[in-house]
Image: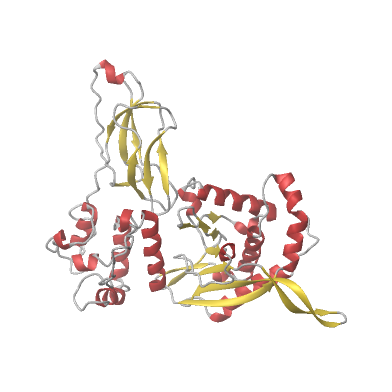
Amino acid sequence: MAQVELVMPKMGESIMEATILHWLKKPGDKIEQDESVLEVATDKVDTEVPSTVAGVLKEILAKEGEVVKVGKPIAIITSDAEAETTGETVVAPATSAAPEMAPASNGFNGSNGSHATAPDFKSASRFYSPLVKNIAKEENIAVAELETIPGSGLEGRVTKKDIMNYVQHRKLGATVQAVQQRVSVGSTQQGPPQRVPVSVSGGDEIIEMDRMRKMIAERMVDSKRISPHVTSFVEADVTNIVFWRNKVKNEFQKREGDTLTFTPIFIEAVALAIKDYPMINVQVDGDKIIKKRDINIGMAVALPSGNLIVPVIKNADQYNITGLAKIVNDLARRARENKLKPDDLAGGTFTVSNVGSFGNVMGTPIIMQPQVAIMALGAVQKKPAVIETPYGDAIAIRHKMFLSHSYDHRVVDGALGGSLVRRVADYLEKFDINRSI
C-alpha cells in the first residue's frame, strides 16, 4: 500500500513557515486529489492546502495552532482507499512536524560566547515555541527583552524569522535604543509597555480583534516606530480623465466584459512617475538602501469584514490601461472573496490607497514596511477653477482630486517626495482625451 507525506507547500518566495488554523478532514476520511485538507495562515494571507493525491487521511502530524516550516510533513495519506480495511500496518515517516529545535551548538551563541541559564518563561505574556525559546537562551535574551520583539505569527506569535532578525540587528547595536524606548513607556521596570487603562460600563460591547486586525494593528504601530512619516499634498485637475472614461467605459465593458474604473488610470500615472524618480522605489535594510528593479504597486482593498488587504500588481509599468484594469478588477474581486494567494501579496515596492472610494478628499496613509512611500487618492470633486484660455483667464467647473503622498524621511527628502507626487499630478492633468482603448 502506497503512502504519501502531505507537506507544507511553498506559498511564495518569502514564506518560510505557516500556522495550521483548522483541519478540514480527520483521520479515516476519504480525500480526492486537489481537495482541500486544511486551512493555514502565513504572515501574508490565509489559504487552504489541497491534497496532492486521492486516498484516505491516515495520520495528522501537526496540530491546529502549530507553526510548521515549508517542506515539512503535516499528514500521511494512503493512496489506496482500501488501506483502512486491509489490516496492513502503515509505517510512519521518520520526520515529523514538531517544532524544530536548534542544535546545542549551532552559531546561536551569545555575544560573550557562553551559554546563559534558561530564561523563566512562566512570566511571559504570550506563547513561545521551543525553537524561539532555545534561540533566546543561546543569545542571552531575557524574557522581558523577548516580550518587546514584534511577532508576525498567529496572534502576534514570535517566529524563528522574527527572533533571528532581532538577533542580527541586536548584534549590530541597532535595536538597543528601540528596546529601551519600548520597555520605558508607561513603566520604569523592565517589561512590555503598560496599557492605558480603559473604562468599561455596563452597556459597552467588548469585541475581540480577529487575527487579521491584530496583524494590521501591530504592523501599523511598527511602521510609525520605524519610519519618520512626512506627507505632501497636491491637487490635480483630472477633468480630461473623467471625460475620457465616460466616453469609453461602455465600449470597454462590451469588448472586455469588465468595468473600467479610475484606479488603473491612476496606477499607470504612479508607475510612470516612479520610473522618472526611481529612488522612491527603494527599501531600507539597516544602513543600506536597496534600489528595487521592478515596480510592483500594491493597492489597498477594503474587505467586507472591515479589514484591509494589499494585493500587489507586479511590474505595473509594463501594462497598458486595459491590462491594468483587468489585473485591478481581478485582485480586488479575489481579495473580497478571500481567494488571494500568498504570492499576490508579496513583493510590493510602492502602495496606493483609494480613500476617495469612501468619499474622503485626502488622507495621511501609513507606509507598508519595508517600502518607503504610499500615496492616497482622494475623491474626484467638481470645483470652480481659474483656467487659462487664448482669450485670457476664465472660471470653469473642473474635476479635481487631492493626492496625499506619505514617505519615509530617513531616505526620502521633501524634494523627492514632493516632486514624485507633483509628477503623478502632471501625468494625470496631461492625459490625452483622444487616447484609444
Q: Quadrant of residue 307?
A: bottom left
Res 140 visible: no
The percent coordinates of residue 435 (x first, y second) are 78, 59
Q: In which quarter of the image is residue 122?
A: bottom left
Q: Which of 238 and 320 is in front in this view?
A: 238
Q: Residue at x 33, y 42 (%)?
A: 22
Q: Quadrant of residue 287?
A: bottom left
The percent coordinates of residue 420 (x first, y second) are 61, 73
Question: Is 271 left, or right, of 239 in this rendering?
Answer: left
Question: Is 34 left, or right, of 104 in this rendering?
Answer: right
Q: Which of 188 and 133 is in front in this view?
A: 188
The percent coordinates of residue 130 (x first, y second) are 21, 52
Question: Is 290 left, or right, of 277 in this rendering?
Answer: left
Res 215 visible: yes
Residue at the limit of the structure toward the left, as seen here: 117
Question: Is 338 left, or right, of 189 in this rendering?
Answer: right
The percent coordinates of residue 329 (x first, y second) are 60, 51
Q: As displayed, is residue 32 above or below residue 399?
A: above
